[in-house]
Amino acid sequence: MKMYLNSIFADPERTARLMDIAQSSFLPLLKGAIFYTIPLTIITFIVGLVLAILTALARISHVKVFQIIARVYVSAIRGTPLLVQLFIIFYGLPNIGIIIDSYIAAVIGFSLSVGAYTSEIIRAAILSTPKGQWEAGYSIGMSYPQVLRRIILPQAARVSIPPLSNSFISLVKDTSLASLVLVSEMFRKAQEIAASNYEFLLVYSEAALIYWAICFILSIFQQYFEKKLDRYV
Amino acid sequence: MISIQGLYKQFGNLEVLKGINLEVEKGNVVVIIGPSGSGKTTMLRCLNVLETPTKGVISIEGNTLDFSGTVPKKNIAAFRRLTGMVFQSYNLFPHKTALENVMEGPLIVKNENKDTARKKAQILLEKVGLGDKIDFYPAQLSGGQQQRVGIARALAMEPKVMLFDEPTSALDPELVGEVLKVMKDLANEGMTMMVVTHEMRFAREAANEVIFMDQGVVIERNNPEEIFTNPKEERTRKFLNMIQ
């Protein structure tokens, strides 16, 4: 550490070089974040959330087959590493003739993962809504999907915002795994840059700071949403 | 108008309703009393099909559900619209304002347009004395106010029968009057009502008929005057002695 700092500040030429690399790598990293990391996060979270709602509904339905499918799905995804799942989809499936573009493979992999983990959040949130809410909906003639969509899910949403934010922020960082299936998201950009100039500490720290900044902004949104949905409680 | 024939309801091994037979005429206000566990709430919930009877036939204004076979969901939904239900714990939708609570049924179930639904909801809320509270969320209302919104919400679906399941039991004593007043007004307008309650004064003042239930059967039914002053059955007498 001391040596590294010494090497930076004792040598004006090296300092200048590092400043230069920090500056010139910032834009490519930011591009990686804006064009790949962030869209990948948002798309997979939306797809994952839809999967999660369906899975949660299957888990609480009275149809045994749905329950079993949902249980197996959640168990398989939670029981295997995300990286292994990504490798199976991107490197494994071509062996049986299914070739998927790296970005799509990442979307599929992350969505399946988000769907499994957040389905438990959604299920708990739905179950935490009092039974009387269902009854009140039914008593004015609403159907199951109507009660679910208009009465239960809005209330479940409020309860699930803090844990869902957690998952979302985790996902931002998990997308760095996509670098290993050749998606040119921010971390892969960082690897490429560092490979050409050997300034690993500098470039990876820079990437880390950008991740941190994104997550910080997200947690501000979380607070905003919580406040907004808290108004009636 | 309402007819219940051979109504049975079993929860697991527990038989809660053991063959209820009951007719209620249009415009009547029927108060159902009885000790806890007598099945009065279950009977009311069966009329709204919040509980599915084990067997029996219920019918309201010519619409009949026969539970000896399986009943299609569509028929249940249609049948539910004949009754309005008021719950002991109000069960208002907490994420919707008083107005939105009342509008929900007409808007979503009846597909009324927003303006019509809003106007109707406003009139109903004025009727229950909450014209100045339409934009309040349930959490901002007292228990009595919430229950009055609950009544307005049920009325918005223009039911043929109003079912009240211990509507004042969760209220602070000083708030009971305002809810009972709304119910009395409704009775005076000729609404057919079935009310499970412990408010004997309401039964005396507003009911045409009082039904005493115990252990899943109807023990005695009569006009309030008779049943309170001159009960025919021993069990009715015992119960009334206990609560008075």
Image (cartoon, helix red, strand yellow):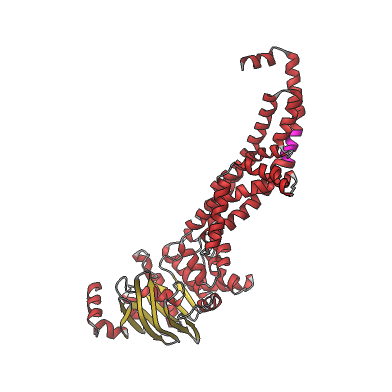
* Residue A101 position within the rendered picture, expressed as x and y whole percent measured from the top left: 75, 46
Instruction: Give the residues drawn in magenta, as a range.
Output: A28-34
Image quadrant where residue A39 sits: top right
Q: Is residue A161 above or below residue B43?
A: above
Q: Can residue A226 be spotted in the picture?
A: no
Q: Is residue B107 above or below residue A215?
A: below
Residue A32 on the magenta segment: yes
* Residue B136 position within the rendered picture, expressed as x and y whole percent measured from the top left: 52, 61
* Residue B129 position within the rendered picture, expressed as x and y whole percent measured from the top left: 47, 70
Q: Along the line of sight, which residue is nearer the eye, A117 or B194?
A: A117
Q: What predominant SS class does the magenta segment belong to?
A: helix
Quick check: B6 left or right of A4?
A: left
Residue A3 on the magenta segment: no
Q: Is residue A19 above or below residue B182?
A: above
Q: Is residue A181 above or below residue B30?
A: above
* Residue A194 position within the rendered picture, expressed as x and y whole percent measured from the top left: 73, 27
